[in-house]
């Protein structure tokens, strides 16, 4: 299968290295980045050399599977191209889908292409998928971050919250996912993944805690439903290339690709 990669940053690089050395069933045929230098640098580090693409459309047209690891801004265009050309797509900037839910639903109905959303920086999406087969009563996510990681969030600025004065774990926001995304846009991917896999933005509850005692971002997901109860906690190590990105997100992209080509799938 020919794959094309859009975005040669923290996640894109991890994906390219993994395909190159560990997933022989995939051929990385094209890589593209708005910063061409990054694409060239990546190609130089790979044993099986892909070509450097010139735009998004070329990547979709000339490959079987497009892997997006770039920006939420291009997700709408990619979904449109995938729908028109019947090409598969894996999306990391899942927050970008929220403005295109109608298109996503149409793609679901038409069934001409497949769209993959890796679990990214959270865990438990497998259990949530199973739980959703029956009634779900509640889903919530509590995200704890070191106070400095919340700097410049619109909610912090608007409410004049003095993060440097926080000396103990402090709940600073409580609302639904829709409100949380506006208040803390950096949480958008985690919120979008949980909402799309679960019960939607309005019914998913979010708490944000500023905790001066932690160094890693922590997500605690709680689900109650007909199946019983589930609690999942992830404490994420930041990517060494991009500290805003959790290393687990890049690994989840690689795991999704490996699952796509593997004849045996566990925990799907
Ligand atoms: N699903 C999740 O849980 C999750 C977790 C972390 C990051 N992400 C998202 O994944 C994406 C990639 O993350 P990252 O850490 O690798 O980011 P990064 O900033 O390290 O790399 C992004 C790369 O994409 C390139 N790029 C930006 N806009 C582009 C465009 N329009 N066309 C082509 N290339 C473009 C940049 O030049 C950069 O090289 C981001 O949108 C991020 O929000 C998702």
Image (cartoon, helix red, strand yellow):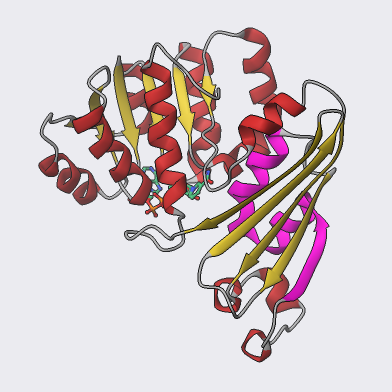
Question: Is the residue 71 above or below the residue 18 in the image?
Answer: below
Q: What residue is rendered at 46% in x and 46% in y?
A: 249
Q: On the picture, is 102 further left or further right than 202?
A: left
Q: For this rendering, which residue is in front, 55 or 234?
A: 234
Q: x, y (%) of residue 106?
A: 67, 17
Q: On the picture, is 259 further left or further right than 122?
A: left
The C terminus sits in image quarter: top right
User: Does the image show residue 65?
Assistant: yes
Q: x, y (%) of residue 155?
A: 72, 71
Q: What residue is rendered at 74% in x and 34% in y?
A: 198
The image quadrant of residue 136 is top right
Q: What residue is rendered at 38% in x and 16% in y?
A: 262
Please identify the residue farthest to the front as the structure is shown.
228
Q: Main secondary structure of the magenta part?
A: helix
Q: On the picture, is 9 further left or further right than 190?
A: left
Boundaries of the magenta span? 170-197
Question: Is the residue 124 above or below the residue 267 in the image?
Answer: below
């Amino acid at each position: 299968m020919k794959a094309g990669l859009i975005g040669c940053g923290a996640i894109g690089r991890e994906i390219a290295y993994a395909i190159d050395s560990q997933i022989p069933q995939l051929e990385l045929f094209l890589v593209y980045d708005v910063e061409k230098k990054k694409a060239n640098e990546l190609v130089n580090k790979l044993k099986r050399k892909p070509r450097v693409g010139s735009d998004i459309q070329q990547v979709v047209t000339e490959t079987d599977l497009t892997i997006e690891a770039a920006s939420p801004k291009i997700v709408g265009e990619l979904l449109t191209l995938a729908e028109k050309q019947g090409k598969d797509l894996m999306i990391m900037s899942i927050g970008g889908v929220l403005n295109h839910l109608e298109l996503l639903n149409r793609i679901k109905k038409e069934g001409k292409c497949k769209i993959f959303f890796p679990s990214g920086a959270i865990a438990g999406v497998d259990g949530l998928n199973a739980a959703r087969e029956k009634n779900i009563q509640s889903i919530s996510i509590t995200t704890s971050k070191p106070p400095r990681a919340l700097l410049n969030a619109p909610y912090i600025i608007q409410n004049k919250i003095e993060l440097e004065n926080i000396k103990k774990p402090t709940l600073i926001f409580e609302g639904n996912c829709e409100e949380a995304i506006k208040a803390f846009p950096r949480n958008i991917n985690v919120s979008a993944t949980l909402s799309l896999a679960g019960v939607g933005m309005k019914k998913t509850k979010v708490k944000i805690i500023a905790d001066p005692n932690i160094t890693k971002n922590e997500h605690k997901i709680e689900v109650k439903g007909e199946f019983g109860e589930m609690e999942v906690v992830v404490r994420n190590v930041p990517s060494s290339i991009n500290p805003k990105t959790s290393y687990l997100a890049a690994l989840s992209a690689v795991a999704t690709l490996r699952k796509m080509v593997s004849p045996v799938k566990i925990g799907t």
